[in-house]
Image: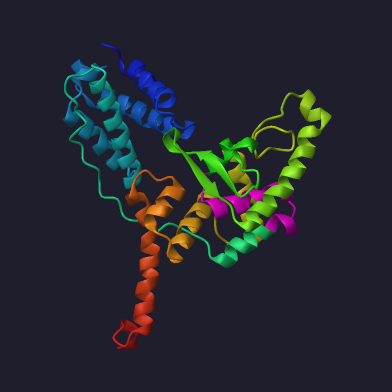
Amino acid sequence: MSDFTDLIEEFLAWQSGVRGLSEHSVAAYRSDLYAMAAMLKANVPPQAKNPACDAVTTEDLRACIGALSRQNKAAASINRFIASVRNFFAYCRRFGYIKIDPACDLKTVKNPVRVPKFMSAEEVDALCAQPGQTPLLWPERDTALFEMLYSSGCRVSELAQLKLGDVSAAYDSALVRGKGGKDRRVFFSKEACAALKRYVAERGKTIGKAGAQAAGKTTEALFINRKGGALSARGMRFIVSRYSSAEGTNRHVSPHVFRHTFATAMLRSGADIRAVQEMLGHSSISTTQRYTHVTTEELTALYNRAHPHGSENK
């Protein structure tokens, strides 16, 4: 029987090569599954050290979950671990490595619903204007990045993978590849379209520099660095953090806050939740429903203020 390391690496290769998961998702699987393997070795009886995959029981896996709880891991982290373990053993069962799936009966832990953080329209406008007012890095690129994050609702990893050829000729939409290799079209506002056109003109100048070409760092990526290489998702996070700190909002703004803000704004304006699900690239409607808590809270507050029998009028 193959040991855990062999099976884990085979599973990760399948997730990446066949299912087309992103590097980030594969890294999360790797972290969870190697943690599982380590805990199994630590928690099973001495005679069962380095157990074969088909020797693992449901109780062994529950012991791993219990160990995570004792480490005060967040519910979201534990549930991700459980999902990783379930998918791994389902894979092993599917391809004949085990006869009985020990993870199929694992239950997720209760995860407190967290209202996603989002920005007000005024905060978005201030942040999008920041590169032009305080040119810390590359104003044209950074303005286009902010406007696209806000108007499209894209994940930062999706923008990092976006190629210039994926953008429409009118610069008003693009075809992005989301989680699981699923393609979808996203749309850009007039502000994002104008900012993107200005940036692409500057991008061409950078790509055209002899130094960048000689270094072999030219790329098809839409967003690039000053040397002509592709701008990574990590680089995008740094840019957002740098400008949000300079803007003086006294809050941490990440690229994902733009995504939360997009979803909240769409639902506030009456967009159908199924349409928002499609725009965000969510595979499950329950993920999109997190944003309805924000609008529901606002409606409740409005009712309490305005209705004669509301709590503020009693």
Asked if residue 303 can be seen in this view, the reply is yes
Numbered disc total: 0
Which residue is nearer to you in this view: 16 or 3?
A: 16
174 falls in the magenta region: no
Relative to 252, 40 lies left or right = left
Query: Which residue occupies 17% across, 30% down?
Result: 58
* Left or right: 42 as drawn, with respect to 9: left
Quick check: 81 above or below 122? above
The residue positioned 50% from the left and 52% from the top of the image is 259
Residue farthest along the top direction in this orientation? 1
Query: With respect to residue 243, does 72 lie above or below?
Result: above
Task: Give the quadrant of the N terminus.
Answer: top left
State whether the magenta stretch is mostly helix, strand or loop: helix
Residue 267 placed where, x, y %? 43, 62
Which residue is located at x 47 percent, y 32 percent? 22
Residue farthest along the front direction in this orientation: 169
**Residue 253 pos. (x, y %):** 55, 54
* Colouring of the image: rainbow
Percent position (x, y) of residue 302? Answer: 39, 77
Give the position of the C terminus as an image quadrant: bottom left
Please check the rendered image and state whether residue 139 is part of the magenta-colored stretch, yes or no: yes
Q: Which residues are magenta?
A: 130-155
Name the one closer to the observer, 25 or 5.
Answer: 25
